[in-house]
């Protein structure tokens, strides 16, 4: 995910309206209502499931809305959501969902099959960054009756239930959202408020300052133990850590500096929740118009990346080197980048560049982009170390450039960045989500890579339509071998996630999906 991608929430106290990092909000213990104040340096992007494609904004929607299906918190097990049951036809290309009766958005609007159909049709029509999660798989949606909605797929898809659990598939209120426009801020909604179907309702949102969630009394599931969640947004990790140590916030998640993680883990006064996560970091290339439309140049840059150097200097050894877009430990992974390029292979890079006429006297010159806050304070350090990796080859001359997240996204959509850093958090836990999202025609365009090849699309269609592990293994091994030739992205590292809480807080359940369910949190 962009998710790359995908980023966390910062919290202020519910009673205050204060600038992030500059305030002293009330702590949960001082509130008459059970309240957890949660700090993050992440940012919310578009307040629209048709466009949002980052893990933090998805977390917001996961808690104020619901999908037809959901995950058991902390696992990859699919369970009923807004649909109490579903059926699959023998061919595996038609899913019929049976909605729970009497479901209503928080403004009282009933949820019907027609609303589900309208929401899915809207995602496809608007063509936002995550729309490929629908348009690549769904042929049409039919409202059979008020409580029955049928998804007809373009071909069988073994992991479609996981897709149906992503926020891109969440029904939205047609009384709030326009059919022909992506909503970037709540103020653009028809009602001026965001109504949902989840365990919480969003009662206040001040961009880059705070978000306040109150338990939704109309939610069909169990009532949360914690009635109010306050997310306080911080401008930097250092200020967030200080607020946590002072007791101003109860929980911190994404993104702390490596030194903060080391120090807080060593302290006995906080609870450390560590997840060996499926999140990855990588370099993207714009492959259609920039100088990197030449794959030999992409190969040369891939050869110069020094993963151990980055991990030690920037992250104090807290992450693992990655030599495939498929994460370590996931089925079908092969480390082709390790065998083809290795690390800091200046000799190979020099040879490749020379074949294209680039030398120390005539170097390959390009801008390398990063976004300074979306991935935490370490991002600038990562970019600088990568620049040093590239500069180790005399035939390369790199200029670092940066842009904040909203502009960064706009830049890749406009093909303004020839090479840039992104991160990925899975939409669904499957090798397909780490490959088709970058090398499939529609997924690649949404990431700003613009790689398109019928052979690759056919391979993805083959594995997506198969339930045979042997077939899927063969496809993914071939795709990873081809990746080390095309190099539309360069995998760098796979990292762990850390959530720190006060000892009085429990119930942190992320798991492989990385969904942060606020309704699982408890206070002693």
Image (cartoon, grey):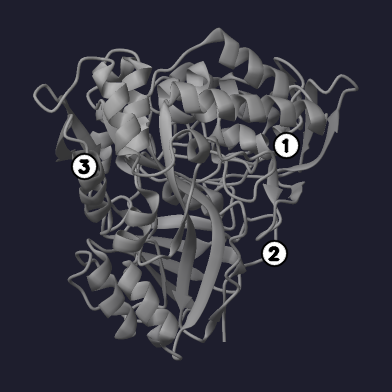
Q: Quadrant of the C terminus?
A: bottom right
Q: Which percent across, then down, holds residue 295?
A: 37, 18
Q: Nearer the viewer, residue 67 or 460?
A: 460
Q: Reply above or below: 429 against 441.
A: below
- Badge 2 or badge 3: first in the primary sequence: 2
Report helix, strand or loop for mark 3: loop
Residue drawn at x 74%, y 16% as measured from the top left: 155
In the displayed structure, does residue 288 sit left or right of residue 108?
left
Tell me if residue 213 comes above or below residue 370 in the rendering. below
Evaluate whether residue 129 shows in this view.
Answer: yes
At 47% across and 47% down in the image, what residue appears? 280
Secondary structure beneath dot 1 equals: helix
Tell whether 460 sits left or right of 300.
right
- Per the image, label 2 sits on a secondary structure element best described as loop
Indicate whether 294 appears above or below 258.
above
Residue matched to label 3: 392
Disc 3 packing (10 Å; few <14; some 14–19; many ≥20): some
| Cα distance between the residues tagged 1 and 2 | 22 Å
Q: Tell me where residue 344 appears, x and y as whole percent.
A: 33, 43
Residue located at (56% from left, 8% from top): 454
Q: CA distance from mark 2 to mark 3?
A: 57 Å
Residue corresponding to mark 1: 161
**Residue 372 located left or right of residue 331:** left
Residue that carries the numbered disc 2 in the rendered image: 222
Q: Find residue 409 and report its image quarter.
A: top left
**Residue 121, picture quadrant:** top right
Viewer-side label of 1, 2: 1
- Point out which mark residue 112 bears: none
């Amino acid at each position: 995910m962009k998710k790359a991608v995908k980023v966390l929430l910062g919290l202020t106290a519910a009673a205050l309206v204060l600038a992030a990092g500059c305030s002293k909000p009330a702590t949960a213990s001082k509130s008459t209502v059970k309240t957890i104040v949660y700090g993050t340096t992440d940012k919310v992007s578009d307040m629209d499931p048709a466009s949002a494609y980052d893990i933090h904004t998805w977390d917001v929607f996961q808690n104020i809305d619901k999908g037809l299906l959901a995950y058991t918190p902390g696992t990859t097990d699919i369970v009923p959501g807004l649909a109490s049951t579903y059926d699959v036809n023998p061919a595996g290309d038609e899913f019929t969902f049976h909605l729970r009766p009497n479901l209503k958005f928080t403004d009282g609007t009933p949820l019907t099959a027609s609303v589900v159909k309208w929401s899915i049709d809207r995602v496809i029509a608007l063509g936002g960054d995550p729309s490929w999660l629908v348009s690549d798989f769904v042929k049409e949606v039919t409202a059979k009756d008020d409580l029955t909605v049928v998804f007809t797929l373009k071909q069988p898809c073994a992991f479609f239930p996981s897709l149906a659990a992503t926020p891109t598939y969440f029904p939205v209120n047609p009384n709030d959202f326009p059919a022909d426009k992506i909503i970037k801020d709540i103020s653009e909604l028809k009602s001026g408020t965001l109504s949902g179907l989840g365990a919480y309702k969003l009662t206040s949102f001040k961009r880059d300052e705070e978000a306040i969630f109150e338990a939704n009394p109309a939610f069909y599931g169990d009532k949360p133990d914690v009635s109010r969640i306050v997310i306080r947004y911080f401008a930097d990790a250092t200020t967030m850590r200080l607020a946590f140590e002072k007791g101003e916030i109860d929980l911190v998640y994404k993104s702390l500096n490596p030194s903060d993680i080391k120090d807080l883990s060593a302290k006995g006064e906080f609870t450390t929740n560590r997840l060996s996560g499926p999140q990855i970091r990588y370099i993207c290339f714009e492959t259609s118009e920039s100088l990197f439309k030449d794959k030999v140049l992409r190969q040369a840059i891939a050869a110069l990346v020094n993963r151990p150097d980055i991990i030690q200097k920037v992250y104090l050894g807290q992450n693992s080197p990655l030599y495939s877009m498929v994460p370590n430990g996931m089925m079908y992974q092969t480390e082709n980048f390790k065998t083809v390029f290795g690390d800091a292979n200046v000799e190979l890079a020099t040879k490749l560049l020379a074949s294209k006429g680039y030398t120390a006297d005539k170097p390959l010159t390009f801008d390398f982009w990063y976004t300074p806050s979306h991935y935490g304070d370490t991002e600038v350090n990562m970019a600088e170390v990568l620049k040093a990796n590239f500069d180790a080859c005399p035939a390369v001359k790199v200029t670092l450039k940066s842009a904040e997240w909203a502009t960064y996204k706009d830049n890749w959509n406009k093909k303004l960045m020839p090479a840039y850093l992104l991160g990925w958090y899975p939409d669904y836990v499957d090798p397909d989500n780490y490959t088709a999202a970058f090398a499939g025609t529609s997924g690649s365009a949404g990431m700003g890579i613009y790689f398109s090849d019928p052979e690759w699309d056919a391979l993805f269609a083959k594995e997506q339509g198969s339930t045979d592990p042997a077939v899927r293994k063969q496809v993914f091994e071939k795709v990873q071998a081809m990746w080390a030739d095309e190099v539309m992205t360069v995998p760098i590292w796979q990292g762990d996630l850390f959530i720190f809480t006060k000892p009085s807080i429990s119930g942190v359940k992320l798991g492989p999906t990385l969904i942060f369910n606020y309704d699982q949190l408890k206070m002693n």
